[in-house]
Image: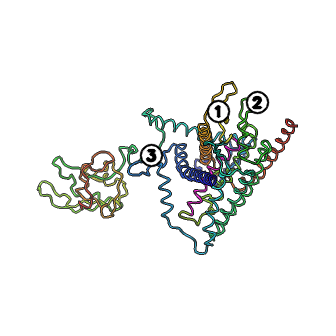
């Protein structure tokens, strides 16, 4: 009973954090793009004259979405048309279940692992739900009975399925190094030290793996350099026939995906919740010196570290989205099948070779 | 015989030179040239990083300036090139042709003598004048009614040029001409003769235009 309550609280906390984070990301996207283009961005939405640098803009956007006409095309498949945005939104949210956001919280005798689901196949779970996201886009294109939506859905399907192959292969090197599929164990191992001073983060063990994983993952989220499925400005995408909050769900799913991707990158390659030199009992530095801290402080430090890493990668993704121009479709496919895929296989081979050499 | 007429020469003696496009000093492009990329560019990451450095450089610089502004520092530097319009206005050039105004004599009456030159020269026929005999016998006539339909006006300034008495000017610097009703966009004589508060601003004691009509 107590365990169920604890799990429910964790689910609730993560859900709230994720959804409100996604709402804030819509603001971050506007503001960051504005600042890097020497503009100010949305700063007019106010409540009773208070503007708070435009932070009420997500609220206004949400209200707008709810009050817009909820339109279903005449001959569209009404069931699938309604299902598609849910199918796009659900996998993005559910992926966060296996991502650990802290080590363990000790309250008296209670030991609470800060992760919703301690799956021993957490990595496969990630890929499986990443794969499910394709259904949302394809069904959206198919069900709206519009040629252009269908074409957009097909583009999305081809792109996402191609990049899923890359996504899986780029991470195999990481699994070989940490020899586990469990995400919390991967993060735990990243708390150790390499050569006595360098934390064993995935980026130091798998630099090529990171360089290949990041673009593939951005392609999975269908954002700009790889936004051909949507292409709202000129090539029409799969959610052309969506309006109101149905469109809002697609829009929102994109921002949830940004946060999930940022969390994933920091979990796999940047030590997750680990703070360098912080262990279960406190700081102990390689140059000597030990600093004992209570468990609560350590958990808070870990949460802060994880949050900062997520914030940085969200920032980086928005930066990339507003810097790079879109790929042509053949370039996109070339990058996947001729660029990333062979290099990922090479990465696997190299990792295996090095592992053989140092671990006989 | 050498003729001075190039047309004549072309027709009879000189062959038109054919341009050898390959020998031009500036290469002649018939279509978009494909830029050959070296290995460094093909690696994709260095160039992407270069681009990201440019944009993140702008981001960091502007954020620093915004942060400094919060503490009241670096006021002479701008973090954004945009103007926050209703509060902050772009400087308008003094020669901007804004809304018209009717100039006044020292006694406060209009300078206009209702000669109808501006109404005649106006390409959009937006000026409507009803002349009237002036009460003063030394003055010939003056407008009883002087209306400018600002919706039709194309701001060419011909009326200002045509006016022999300097009675109409476009130097109010007012360019925010909007209203809720088309009929209110027909400015009458009293409105056009009002003093403008300052450059770019409507008259201080500006009543709703429907009241004047």
Judging from the image, what secondary structure is the residue with disc 2 in? Answer: loop
Which quarter of the figure is the C terminus of chain A placed in?
top right
To the question of a shared chain for discs 1 and 3, the answer is yes
How far is the residue under mark 3 from the one under mark 2?
47 Å
Task: Name the side, left or right, on which A120 lies relative to A7.
Answer: right
Percent x, y of residue A7: 63, 52
Label 3 CA crowd tier, 10 Å (few <14, some 14–19, many 20+) = few
Task: Name the side, left or right, on which B107 lies relative to A287.
Answer: left
Q: Main secondary structure of the magenta part?
A: helix
Q: Nearer the viewer, mark 1 or mark 3?
A: 1
Q: Quadrant of residue B117?
A: bottom left
Judging from the image, what secondary structure is the residue with disc 1 in? Answer: strand
User: Is A232 located above or below residue B95 in the figure?
Assistant: below
The disc at residue A52 is 3
To the question of a shared chain for discs 3 and 2, the answer is yes
Upstream in the sequence, badge 3 or badge 2?
Answer: 3
The disc at residue A195 is 2
Q: Quadrant of residue A210?
A: top right
Residue at 30% across, 64% down: B183
Q: Is residue A276 visible?
A: yes
How far is the residue under mark 1 from the one under mark 3?
38 Å
Judging from the image, what secondary structure is the residue with disc 3 in? Answer: helix
Task: Name the side, left or right, on which A29 lies relative to B213.
Answer: right
User: Is A212 located above or below residue A73 in the figure?
Assistant: above
Which quarter of the figure is the N terminus of chain A placed in?
bottom right
Residue at 71% across, 58% down: A131
The residue under label 1 is A282
């Amino acid at each position: 009973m107590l365990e169920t309550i604890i799990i429910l609280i964790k689910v609730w906390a993560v859900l709230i954090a994720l959804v409100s984070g996604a709402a804030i990301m819509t603001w971050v996207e506007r503001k960051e793009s504005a600042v890097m283009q020497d503009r100010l961005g949305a700063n007019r939405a106010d409540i009773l004259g208070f503007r708070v640098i435009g932070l009420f803009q997500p609220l206004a956007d949400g209200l707008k979405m709810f009050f817009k006409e909820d339109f279903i095309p005449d001959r569209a498949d009404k069931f699938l048309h309604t299902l598609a945005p849910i199918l796009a939104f659900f996998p993005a949210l559910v992926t966060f279940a296996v991502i650990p956001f802290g080590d363990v919280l000790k309250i008296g005798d209670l030991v609470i692992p800060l992760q919703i689901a301690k799956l021993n196949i957490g990595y496969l779970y990630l890929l499986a739900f990443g794969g499910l996201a394709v259904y949302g886009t394809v069904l959206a294109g198919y069900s709206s009975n519009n040629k252009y939506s269908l074409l957009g859905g097909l583009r999305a399907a081809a792109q996402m399925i191609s990049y899923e192959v890359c996504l899986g292969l780029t991470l195999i090197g990481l699994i070989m190094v940490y020899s586990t599929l469990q995400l919390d164990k991967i993060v735990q191992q990243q708390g150790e030290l390499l050569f006595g001073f360098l934390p064993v983060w995935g980026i130091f063990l798998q630099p090529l793996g990171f360089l290949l994983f990041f673009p593939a993952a951005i392609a999975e989220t269908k954002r700009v350099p790889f936004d051909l499925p949507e292409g709202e400005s000129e090539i029409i995408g799969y959610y052309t026939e969506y309006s109101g909050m149905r469109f809002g769900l697609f829009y929102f799913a994109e921002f949830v995906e940004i946060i999930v991707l940022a969390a994933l990158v920091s979990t796999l390659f940047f030590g997750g919740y680990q703070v360098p030199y912080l262990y279960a009992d406190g700081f102990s530095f390689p140059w000597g010196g030990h600093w004992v801290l209570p468990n609560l402080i350590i958990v808070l430090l870990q949460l802060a570290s994880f949050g900062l890493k997520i914030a940085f990668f969200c920032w980086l993704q928005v930066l990339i989205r507003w810097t790079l121009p879109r790929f042509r479709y053949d370039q996109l496919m070339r990058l996947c099948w001729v660029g990333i895929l062979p290099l990922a296989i090479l990465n696997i081979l190299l990792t295996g070779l090095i592992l053989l050499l140092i671990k006989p | 015989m050498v003729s001075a007429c190039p047309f004549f020469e072309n027709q009879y003696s000189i062959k038109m030179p054919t341009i050898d496009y390959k020998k031009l000093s500036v290469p002649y492009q018939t279509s978009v040239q494909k830029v050959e990329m070296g290995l460094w560019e093909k690696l994709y990451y260095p160039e992407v990083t270069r681009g990201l450095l440019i944009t993140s450089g702008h981001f960091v610089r502007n954020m620093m300036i915004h942060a400094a502004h919060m503490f009241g520092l670096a006021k002479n530097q701008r973090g954004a090139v945009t103007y926050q319009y209703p509060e902050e206005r772009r400087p308008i050039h003094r020669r901007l042709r804004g809304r018209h105004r009717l100039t006044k004599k020292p006694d406060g009456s209009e300078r206009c003598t209702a000669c109808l030159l501006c109404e005649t020269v106006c390409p959009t026929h937006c000026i409507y004048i009803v002349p009237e005999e002036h009460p003063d016998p030394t003055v010939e006539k003056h407008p009883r009614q002087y209306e400018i339909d600002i919706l039709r006006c194309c701001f060419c300034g011909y009326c200002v040029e045509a006016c022999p008495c300097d009675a109409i000017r476009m130097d109010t610097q007012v360019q925010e001409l909007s209203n809720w009703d088309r009929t209110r966009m027909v400015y009458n004589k009293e409105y056009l003769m009002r003093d403008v508060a300052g450059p770019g601003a409507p008259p201080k004691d500006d009543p709703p235009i429907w009241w004047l009509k």
